[in-house]
Image: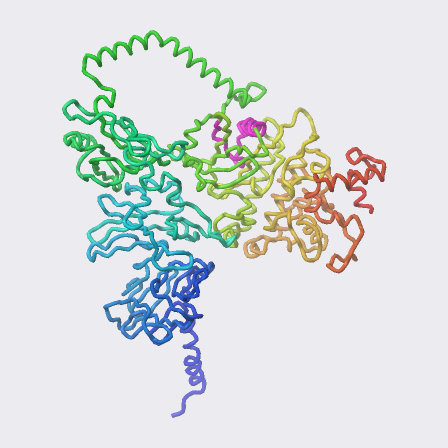
Amino acid sequence: MERDPIFTLICLLIVVFSPLELSEEVDVLGVEGSISDGETLVSSLETFQLGFFSPGKSRNRYLGIWFKTCPGTVVWVANRNNPIADGKGVLAVSDSGNLVLLNQTKSVVWSSNMSVTAQNPVAQLLDTGNLVLKDNKSMAGSYFWQSFDYPSDTLLPGMKVGWNLKTGEERYLTSWKSADDPSPGNFTFRLDKNGLPQLVIDTESMKTYRTGPWNGFGFEAIPAYLNFLFKHNVVSNENEIFFSYEVANKEITTRLWLNYTGYLQRLIFTHDSKNWEFLYAAPFDKCGIYGFCGANSVCSSRRADACKCLKGFISKSQESKNCVRESSLDCQKGDGFTRLVGVKVPDLLKFQLNESLSLKQCEAECLKNCSCTAYVNMNVSEGRTSCVMWFGDLFDISEVSDMYRNEVVFVRLSASGLGLTHDSRKKNRLMAILIVSIISSATILGLISFIIWKKWKKRDDLLHLTRLESGEDEREVPLFHFSTIEIATNYFSFGNVIGEGGFGPVYKGNLPTGQEIAVKRLSKDSGQGVEQFRNEVVLIAKLQHKNLVGLLGCCIQGNERMLVYEFMPNKSLDSFIFGSQGVICADHKKKAQLSWRNRFDIVLGITRGLLYLHQDSKLPIIHRDLKASNILLDSNLIPKISDFGLARIFCGNDVETKTSRVVGTFGYMAPEYAIDGTFSAKSDVFSFGVLLLEIVSGKKNRGYSHLDHLHNLLGHAWLLWNEDRGLEVMDTILEETCVRSEVLRFIHVGLLCVQECPEDRPTMSSVLFKLTNEEATLPRPKAPGFFVQRNPYDNFSSTSVTTDWSFCLHSMQWMEDFVISDVFIFWVSFLEIVSGKSSTGFSHPNHHQDLLGYVSRNC
């Protein structure tokens, strides 16, 4: 019987292409396959890679796993103790189901050493970085063996550090011996399960660092701000007890690395810079070093002399950091307790744990035992506490920043140590205190009143009372105490920094109420000073609009000047449309989060906010520093204009004002302001036009380059517009979501806003009308500021040479870079000498350009 030829062809295609389909699964290694030195196994999403490597300067070969985007970052090593001396290593799956690493002589260098025999064994590299052995026909997640059970020096999300209570096996990190040698080094990072679980770093059975016990929410010495990025877990049951962590945002690439010097580092990979950024290290400072201050003392890195004896204790000697009791305990005379707040609790050396006692019962139990030196009612999980009592010296106590999560330690002191005596002496002392209090109350009250008056007067001097000149609307800016801001920002921790501007660093913080805040702290090295600080507080206190950032208050203490704003979870606009260095995943994916409709709404929001400043607020205000980084986005991507340090109030019917000090951001400055110091509402319109074109194009005006010309983004957009190619300005990522007519209208309005002459630019009310009305008639835009029309026959290739002075003005970036430089001043002076005319006072009946613009246009 003859077969249908079409049927035969189909069968042949199935046979031919089936192997190709199977071969695409490059993350799986079967019994019949192997990996030789030079070949790799890659996880399905190309996150991790398995292969052979040589660390540092070593020539030895090791089998390891690393991040595919960062090949030098090895997270797991198989043959740590048995390197291969040549490049002849081979990884295979044996018939029994074990992973085996063979050298040139086919001797087994390393093996998974699994006792169970698998029927259909395969090895697979998962996108978590876990290398697993499984039955190819079994359910997903069922593994015979996995590399996560045998960590090296790196803890990845989902890995465990802890104990298998049934087998007694312990999982822990071990540092490399050196950067060139991945064999087990001197330091380990493990979970100490003695009493309450805590994480420790030790060397040769001696602790070098500990986190403090798990209190149900976290570890005391690990900064609370890390909880925004990572979820720390401690699981304890009859089978196991372990620590692991998860990443709050799947886009974050992170690792916990125990380096060969004994430091545990939390690192995050920034995809824009392709580098690992340091986030946190342990020990973080000298107070993180285990037992740095000895027994019965508290370590504080905020003090010059870090070590201080506990209350009721004194230094044992000048040579020793240990402290001893000033007076011995005496159970018969009635001991008491002093409170110790905001500290990492003492190490669990000699202690007793009772999970059924309340705080009062814990205190009573400690008083019953004359050897009990301290107690704490510790959170161990949600809704469950335990009584922990210490016996003997208290060791490794240090201040920690997260006071709202830490426990109160009650340290036992003798009656004399607490200042208590016999009843009669106590009565006499109380009587004396009462008499002194009555006599001095008036004096104290007067002194307090005077201090309050001085403090309020000083604040009024600095803030100008934040009242309107009309005397109406007398709202005052709330003042925050420095300690409140300090605690909220984790003592201005580097990990809380979310931005940096001309004013200084910006910190994220959490108030005791749970409200998230952003704190701008005036830097001592800042180019801005008290004047800008006062200006921003006075102005923004009077502004109430949906599209302006909300000021919650300020802090003035000593030399400290801080502004407290509502926190914007999506940070600034520039991190979306450009991608900012240091911002996690500020790349193509983050850009794509802003669809055309999002950008449309953001532009309208900025327009309404600027219109409010210019026209609808009680005092007309010019912002003077409108740019992408000063547009913040809330959780719903609603834009809010921020940073009013350079803003100015317009008085009376002023149309424009002149200043001798030009401040702002190059790339957004209007030409009349950058060159002549003249600013008006039309200066903000120019900045808005630049911002509008940047939002549409996804490119920065300053620094923009093109192969065909030397113009900036404004000039490029204008050239394309004149050639009816305006849509080419649009960010290509918007092609699927945009409405082309709206994009063209936005580009058109942007070009109208950046016209050279202020009189040609529309007002913000006109801008809003033009943006929101499709039937609005728009005039043809003129040349943008800083733009000089080129001769169409000019050739700016690397082989051409020109002496035309206008060549220097073809790039706005060049213009701005030198607008306040000695070269530029020399150039202007030269033109003034040649022409006999003043640059700033120059006028012409046919245009509004200054001398420099006139020469550039006509030469």
Does the magenta run of residues contain 535? yes
**Residue 828: x and y, percent?**
78, 39
**Residue 766: x and y, percent?**
65, 38
Residue at 70 percent across and 57 percent down: it is 708
The answer, for residue 51, to whether it is visible in the render is no
Image-based side of 139 in relation to 19, left or right: left
Q: Give 112 or 649, whichever is nearer the viewer.
A: 112
Residue at 56 percent across and 18 percent down: it is 471
Quick check: 646 above or below 470?
below
Residue at 23 percent across and 55 percent down: it is 164
Residue at the limit of the structure toward the bottom, as seen here: 1
The part of the image, by quadrant, that contains residue 226 is top left
Residue at 75 percent across and 60 percent down: it is 799
Quarter that holds the N terminus: bottom left
Quick check: 90 above or below 421?
below
Quick check: 577 above or below 141?
above
Q: Give 813 or 368, whichever is nearer the viewer.
A: 368
Does the magenta run of residues contain 79? no
**Residue 126: x and y, percent?**
37, 62
Total labels: the figure holds 0
Q: Give 139 or 457, whichever is nearer the viewer.
A: 457
Q: Give 811 or 769, whichever is nearer the viewer.
A: 811
The part of the image, by quadrant, that contains residue 398 is top left
Highlighted range, magenta:
530-555
Colour convention: rainbow
Quick check: 263 above or below 14?
above
**Residue 258: x and y, percent?**
37, 51
The answer, for residue 349, to whether it is visible in the render is yes
